[in-house]
Image: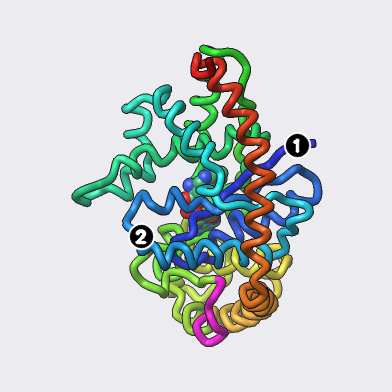
């Protein structure tokens, strides 16, 4: 059986970009693969955090994993910092990674651009991500488009290690959806939707109320043509709304374009509000119930035990090869 691993940072509020590009897809993988889904709280510390908020967001994200349908009997759900092997392998891999290749990471360049006191953690972030993946011998890693370069680095590091020390790590494949791997910002459809964009009108979060969803979608930037057509190059706003609709409703883009032909953008937007609200409401209800139940910490404890068993075996093998076991 193939192994799948993916992770999400417990920072900001999870957006429908995170959901459609990654989390929603996790649910399908757990049926057919041996799946590991982690909450990468060590990655969160590459930028300043409030400890109490980080703790709350970590539990919140775990509850969200469960609320969208991840089943702890089918998937291993765990918090990154509960498995210390991640940090240890990250160190070993840092000693294989080159300064130059990390400097070429576009996410590092974007996040550090113009900032003072950029941490070393932000720089070595992708190496920790490689450790997350390689520890579990993952065959496949479902992620959004923005993680592609980090996956390439992961593969390079695994190959470099294997060439030097023998076959220790499986070379993982990124699984980037053909459609929906890059949901764009509602306030600027030329840039990706992001948890950390300054304006809340950039994104719909999984915690948004129906009124918030409505006002964000109705204000979404489109164009002046008023013709519903899918063309991400020339009509990024409307194409993004069609993409979001299609991924939530299951209707194809062609069906949507036909159904809304001759109607204004307002009609499409109103329909999209209904589709998103109806999809998110049961998730939000279940999320509230899970948080109230106190079940989440238990799931994470068992998840960490299962994850550690796998991670420890890989780490031990890597350490033996490197002369670190006496
Ligand atoms: P993070 O927390 O920024 O995002 C979580 C997932 O959401 C995807 N995503 C998007 N997909 C479509 N449209 C968007 N606008 C959009 N924005 C975000 C991301 O690609 C990601 O799949 N480095 C990772 C976390 C990580 C990880 C890992 C992932 C750490 N270790 C190991 C996979 C395997 C990150 O910061 O994701």
Q: Nearer the viewer, residue 280 or 78?
A: 78
Q: Residue at x 53, y 21 (%)?
A: 319
Residue 242 placement (x, y as % from top left): 60, 67
Q: Is residue 78 left or right of residue 156?
A: right
Position of 216 relative to 304 (above/below) = below
What label does residue 110 carry, if any?
A: none
Residue 84 in picture, x, y percent from top left: 52, 41
Q: Residue at x 59, y 80 (%)?
A: 273
As measured in the structure, the alpha-carbon distance from the residue carrying label 2 to the one carrying label 1 is 35 Å
Query: Label 2's element?
Result: loop
Question: Residue 77, position in %: x, y?
Answer: 65, 53
Total numbered badges shown on the rendered structure: 2
Q: Position of residue 246 (x, y in %)?
A: 66, 65
Q: Are marks 2 and 1 in contact (CB under 8 Å)?
A: no
Between circles 2 and 1, the one closer to the viewer is 2
Residue that mark 2 sits on: 49
Question: Can you say whether 253 is above or below 167 in the image?
Answer: below
Residue 196 falls in image quadrant: bottom left
Viewer-nearest residue: 274 or 150: 150
- Whether residue 305 appears in magenta in the rendering, the answer is no
Crowding at label 2, few (<14), some or many (≥20) Cα neighbours within 10 Å? few
Q: Nearer the viewer, residue 144 or 180?
A: 144
Say whether mark 1 is within 8 Å of ligand 1: no
Residue of label 1: 2
Instruction: Inspect the magenta stretch and tell me whether residue 207 lies in it.
Output: yes
Q: Residue at x 75, y 36 (%)?
A: 2
**Magenta-tinted stretch:** 206-213
Q: Earlier in the sequence, mark 2 or mark 1?
A: 1
């Amino acid at each position: 059986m193939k192994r799948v691993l993916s992770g999400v940072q417990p920072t900001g509020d999870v957006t429908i970009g995170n959901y459609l590009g990654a989390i929603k897809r996790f649910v399908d993988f757990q049926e057919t693969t041996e799946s590991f889904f982690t909450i990468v709280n060590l990655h969160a510390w590459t930028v300043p955090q409030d400890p109490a908020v980080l703790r709350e967001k970590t539990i919140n994200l775990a509850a969200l994993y469960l609320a969208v349908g991840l089943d702890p009997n089918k998937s291993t759900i765990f918090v990154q910092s509960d498995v210390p092997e991640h940090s240890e392998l990250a160190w070993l891999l840092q000693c294989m990674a080159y300064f130059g290749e990390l400097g070429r990471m576009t996410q590092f360049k974007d996040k550090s651009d113009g900032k003072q006191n950029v941490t070393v953690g932000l720089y070595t972030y992708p190496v920790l991500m490689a450790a997350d993946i390689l520890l579990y011998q993952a065959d496949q890693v479902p992620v959004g488009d923005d993680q592609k370069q980090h996956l390439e680095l992961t593969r390079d590091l695994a190959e470099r290690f294997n060439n030097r020390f023998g076959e220790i790590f499986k070379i993982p494949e990124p699984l980037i959806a053909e459609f929906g791997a890059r949901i764009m910002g509602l306030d600027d459809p030329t840039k990706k939707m992001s948890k950390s964009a300054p304006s809340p009108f950039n994104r719909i979060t999984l915690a948004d109320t129906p009124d918030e969803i409505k006002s964000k979608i109705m204000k979404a930037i489109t164009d002046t043509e008023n013709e519903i057509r899918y063309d991400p190059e020339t009509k990024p706003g409307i194409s993004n709304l069609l993409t979001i609709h299609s991924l939530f409703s299951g209707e194809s883009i062609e069906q949507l374009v036909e159904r809304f032909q001759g109607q204004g953008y307002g009609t499409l937007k109103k329909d999209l509000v209904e589709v998103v609200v109806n999809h998110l409401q049961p998730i939000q209800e279940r999320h509230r119930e899970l948080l109230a139940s106190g079940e989440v910490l238990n799931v994470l404890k068992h998840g960490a035990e299962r994850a550690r068993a796998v991670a420890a075996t890989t780490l031990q093998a890597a350490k033996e090869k490197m002369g670190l076991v006496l």
